[in-house]
Amino acid sequence: MPLPEQDKEWLNGLTLRFDEFPAASDIVREGEVFAGVFVVTAGHACRYKILPDGGRQILDFMFAGDKTELHSLLLTSTDHGIFALGPTAIAWINRDRLMAEIIDHPRVAVALWWNALQRAAILRERITAMGRRDAYARVAHLLCEIYERLRMVGEIVDHNYRLPVTQAELGDALGLSEVHANRILRRLQTEGLIVYQVRNLRIPNLDALKEAAAWSPTYLHLDGSSQVVRNATPVPPRLW
Amino acid sequence: MPLPEQDKEWLNGLTLRFDEFPAASDIVREGEVFAGVFVVTAGHACRYKILPDGGRQILDFMFAGDKTELHSLLLTSTDHGIFALGPTAIAWINRDRLMAEIIDHPRVAVALWWNALQRAAILRERITAMGRRDAYARVAHLLCEIYERLRMVGEIVDHNYRLPVTQAELGDALGLSEVHANRILRRLQTEGLIVYQVRNLRIPNLDALKEAAAWSPTYLHLDGSSQVVRNATPVPPRLW
DNA sequence: CGCTCGTTTGAGCACCTTCAAAGCTGGTGG
DNA sequence: CCACCAGCTTTGAAGGTGCTCAAACGAGCG
């Protein structure tokens, strides 16, 4: 996300082809040989796993600018699927050229790397929420995180964002039942912390919601990130 | 972990200095500026977070061969601490030389990269367990995972491994209370799936435990990994 | 030998689940 | 343009998994 404009354009040149997926369709199926690397250019997707008993766990969300890690080079098959929550557009990346060109674009390499570290931090925060927060704080926390992540890519309009997620999916992301996810959302609504209608979320008072979630921005590592990317690189350019 | 012997030796040459930590001590404190990269050479450590209300969440475990990701280069401060569960020895890595030498050792770069991908996969599996498995399967699942990870580094002796973890810590890792963690362990014990005494765990019938946990090895990506590392690299050598 | 830390067990309770059914809403076809 | 339909949301009621509080037991250590 925190890529300077010039590198973004350069990245466009790497695109193999664009693809679109309708709402509620699989982009990558669990267990299949990983097709390649892609970037979400618009829409909302998520990674998920299906358990033997049919249960589903949503692992994390992917918004515009998010990319798959470079699994395909090293791992033979995926351990999870990727699912388009709403209509979603992606750009498949030419792996060989990506690899080859990264040498000349240290910033991009650093950005990719930084991105992978941030994703891991998000996973750790999710674990923390699922293990040690109750359903109320957990839902509030996730809504805060999505807010901040969408804000970074300019998808927050007047404290509103689209969240094309059913309440069952929200539950699957947080380890809650559909019914309980609904009750928590209703409670947040009656308390005035959110206004959730037709898959659109409005957060009138972000600070209040963050308070309820005990949300802290540190795990997103927003501070130093873009500087690092911008200020040349901490490693010799030719390295990457 | 799946590093060929020659690269291991080479890695030894990169060590800045060795350090030892007693049981139940902090190796890295949460929020501090990240000191650097290190490898656990012996012992058992874990990453953790402390919540505002005092609750603790253990994020994952680090055994011999596990290393910190290269956070220190890109992120200004840690979002989590690292804690020595038992007496633990680590090797601090000389970052600059690591960076510089990686160029000439593509295998090592790939191994590091693969390692980061595997760690993320482990985090995703943990999320799945916490969200969609009950306490019984969750405990069994973690014990299976630790078994397999320790087996890779040769720390399983006759179906036994040391697990220098209190039951409270086990609970903190899985989102359970100390009391409930205890009850589940006792249940696994009476069912003959484990023998757990003085922080030593014996698994008489691994398949039975895996069955109880609905454990599948895919997320560890053990299959292709070492081959990839061994078979030169999928990318031009000079790249990494 | 006493002390501290960890384990074990009991009892009561709460959060969250499951099951069931009714109310909505947006999309589709007649 | 209306009616139907499918999927999503909402609400109620009952039950269970796992928590909290509390206390006893054990074991290693100074």
Image (cartoon, coloured by chain):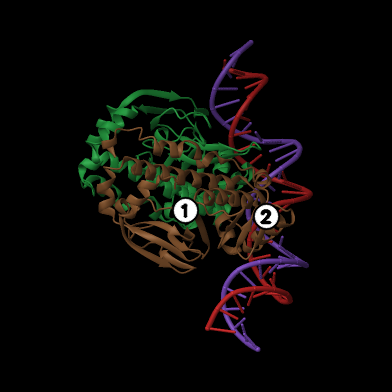
Chain colours: A green, B brown, C purple, D red
Secondary structure under badge 1? helix
Mark 1 to mark 2 CA distance (whole Å) = 44 Å
Residue at 42 percent across and 63 percent down: it is B89
Using the image, determine if residue A79 lies above or below residue A130: above
**Residue B71, which numbered label?**
none
- Tell me if B172 is positioned left or right of A7 in this view: right
Residue at 36 percent across and 41 percent down: it is B110
Instruction: Give the number of the mark in front: 1 or 2.
Output: 2
**Residue A209, which numbered label?**
1
Chain for numbered disc 2: B
Q: Quarter of the image holding residue A207?
A: bottom left
Position of residue A173 measured from the top left corner of the image (x, y, whole percent): 54, 43
Residue at 30 percent across and 50 percent down: it is B74
- Tell me if B102 is positioned left or right of A40 in this view: left
| Image quarter of the C terminus of chain B | top left
**Residue B194, which numbered label?**
2
Using the image, determine if residue A32 lies above or below residue B107: above
Chain for numbered disc 1: A
Amino acid type, mark 2: Ile
Using the image, determine if residue A224 lies above or below residue B223: below
Position of residue A175 measured from the top left corner of the image (x, y, whole percent): 58, 46
Residue nearest the observer in this picture, B35 or A18? B35
Amino acid type, mark 1: Leu
**Label 2 neighbourhood size at 10 Å, few (<14), some (14-19), many (20+)?**
many
Secondary structure under badge 2? loop
Position of residue A80 measured from the top left corner of the image (x, y, whole percent): 52, 36
**Quick check: can you spot residue A186?**
no
Residue at 61 percent across and 53 percent down: it is B158
**Quick check: can you spot residue A153?**
yes
